Image (tube, grey):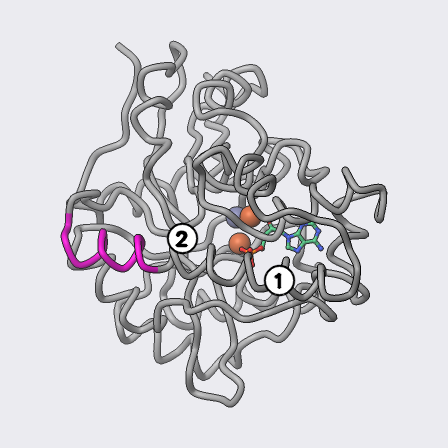
C-alpha cells in the first residue's frame, strides 16, 4: 500500500510575498515530498502559468489565491483572508476586484512609506516596488526594506508593534467577505477561510460570522496552521464539524519571509477530494 498523499493547500511565491518563483515553488514542493501543493498568492493568479509549466512529475498543482477580505459587521472592520481554489481566473467581476485590491495595496504601501519617511526612516517606495518585482506588494516587502536599512533584523521584528504591526500599520481597501465568497463561487471556485482563529495575528472574527459565511457558501476552514494554538485548532475543527465544513491544514509557506516549511501542516485526502469535487472553474493539474 502506498503512503497517504501529502497535501499542502497554502503556499506563496514571488507573485506575491513569497521568496521562491512559482517554478521554484513547485520544485521545492516535490523536493519536500508533497503529492499536492496549492499556489495561493495574495490577490493574484499571476503565478499559475509558470507553476504549471514547471510542474515536476508526481506533483499535482491546485491553482488558487488568498483573497484580502474584510468583515464590515463591526467598527473598525476586521481584515481576514479567504483561500479560493480552482476558480475560473477569467471571471470578469472577480478579476476586477482582485485588480482593485492589488492597486489598493500599492496605495496603502506608499502611505506607510510616507509615514516612515516623515519620522526620518529612510525607506524608498520605488525600491520596495522593485523588491516586489511585479508581484502583489505587501508589508513583507516593506519589512525587507527595513531590514536592508538595518533598522530591524528579521521580518518578525518588522511586524512588531513599533513597526508594521501597529505604529505604521494602515488598513487597505479589501473586499467585503460576503461578496468575495459569492464571487469565488460564481467563478466555480471553492472558498476556505484561512487561519480563521489566529488571534496572535490580530483581531479575529466571532463564530457567528463563520456560521453566516457557511450559509453564504463558505466551503471550509483552515485548522492546522502555524498561527493557530492547539486550542484554536480544536475549536476550528469543532466549528467545522457543526457546520459541515471541510477542514484543511497547510504551511502558508512564504520562502525565507517566514520560518515555516512546505508540508509543515497538511490536509486529509478526503477534504482535498471534497474541494476538487466542488470546483467547476479549473481542474488540478498533474504533469503528464
Ligand atoms: P499585508 O498583506 O500587506 O497586510 O501583509 C500581511 C502579510 O505579512 C501576511 O500575508 C504574511 O505574509 C506577513 N505577516 C503577517 N504577520 C507577520 C509576522 N508576524 N511575521 C512575519 N510575517 C508576517
Ligand atoms: Fe503573505
Ligand atoms: Fe493569510
Ligand atoms: Zn497565506
Q: Quadrant of the C terminus?
A: top left
Which residue does the image show at 58% across and 38% down from the upper left? 253
**Number of residues whose C-alpha sits closer than 10 Å to that of mark 1, classed few (under 14), some (14–19) or many (20 or more):** many
- Considering depth in this image, is 258 or 107 the residue closer to the camera? 107
Is residue 97 found inside the magenta-colored segment of the image?
yes
- Magenta residues? 91-100
Residue 195 screen position, x and y as percent: 55, 59
- Considering depth in this image, is 245 or 98 the residue closer to the camera? 98
- Is residue 33 rendered to the left or right of residue 107? right
Q: What secondary structure predominates along the stretch shown in magenta?
A: helix
- Considering depth in this image, is 209 or 126 the residue closer to the camera? 126
Q: Which element carries disc 1, helix, strand or loop?
A: helix
Identify the residue position indicated by label 1 in the image: 112
Q: Say if mark 1 contacts mark 2, CB within 8 Å.
A: no
Q: Which element carries disc 2, helix, strand or loop?
A: strand
Q: Is mark 1 within 8 Å of ligand 1?
A: no
Which residue does the image show at 50% across and 38% down from the upper left? 11
Where is residue 256, by image quadrant?
top right
**Number of residues whose C-alpha sits closer than 10 Å to that of mark 2, classed few (under 14), some (14–19) or many (20 or more):** many
- Considering depth in this image, is 238 or 59 the residue closer to the camera? 59
- Is residue 194 rendered to the left or right of residue 271? right
Count the marks: how many?
A: 2
Is residue 25 found inside the magenta-colored segment of the image?
no
Residue 83 — which label?
2
Q: Is mark 2 within 8 Å of ligand 4?
A: yes
Residue 110 screen position, x and y as percent: 55, 57
Q: Earlier in the sequence, mark 1 or mark 2?
A: 2
Which residue does the image show at 45% across and 38% down from the upper left? 135
- Is residue 125 rendered to the left or right of residue 85? right
Amino acid at each position: 500500500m502506498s503512503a497517504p498523499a501529502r497535501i499542502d493547500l497554502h503556499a506563496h511565491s514571488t507573485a506575491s510575498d513569497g521568496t521562491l518563483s512559482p517554478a521554484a515553488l513547485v520544485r521545492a514542493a516535490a523536493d519536500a515530498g508533497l503529492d499536492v501543493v496549492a499556489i495561493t498568492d495574495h490577490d493574484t493568479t499571476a503565478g499559475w502559468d509558470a507553476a504549471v509549466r514547471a510542474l515536476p512529475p508526481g506533483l499535482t498543482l491546485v491553482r488558487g489565491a488568498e483573497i484580502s477580505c474584510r468583515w464590515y459587521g463591526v467598527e473598525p472592520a476586521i481584515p481576514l483572508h479567504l483561500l479560493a481554489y480552482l476558480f475560473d481566473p477569467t471571471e470578469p467581476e472577480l478579476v476586477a476586484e482582485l485588480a482593485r485590491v492589488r492597486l489598493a495595496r500599492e496605495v496603502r504601501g506608499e502611505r506607510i512609506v510616507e509615514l516612515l519617511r516623515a519620522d526620518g526612516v529612510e525607506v524608498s517606495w520605488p525600491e520596495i516596488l522593485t523588491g516586489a518585482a511585479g508581484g502583489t506588494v505587501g508589508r513583507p516587502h516593506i519589512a525587507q526594506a527595513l531590514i536592508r536599512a538595518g533598522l530591524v533584523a528579521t521580518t518578525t521584528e518588522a511586524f512588531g508593534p513599533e513597526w508594521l504591526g501597529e505604529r505604521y500599520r494602515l488598513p487597505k481597501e479589501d473586499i467585503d467577505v460576503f461578496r468575495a465568497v459569492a464571487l469565488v463561487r460564481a467563478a466555480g471556485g471553492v472558498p476556505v477561510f484561512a487561519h480563521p482563529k489566529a488571534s496572535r495575528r490580530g483581531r479575529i472574527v466571532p463564530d457567528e460570522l463563520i456560521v453566516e459565511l457557511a450559509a453564504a457558501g463558505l466551503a471550509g476552514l483552515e485548522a492546522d496552521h502555524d498561527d493557530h494554538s492547539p486550542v484554536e485548532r480544536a475549536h476550528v475543527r469543532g466549528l467545522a464539524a457543526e457546520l459541515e465544513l471541510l477542514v484543511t491544514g497547510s504551511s502558508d509557506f512564504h520562502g525565507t519571509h517566514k520560518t515555516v516549511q512546505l508540508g509543515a501542516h497538511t490536509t486529509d485526502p478526503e477534504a482535498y477530494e471534497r474541494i476538487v469535487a466542488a470546483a467547476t472553474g479549473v481542474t488540478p493539474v498533474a504533469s503528464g
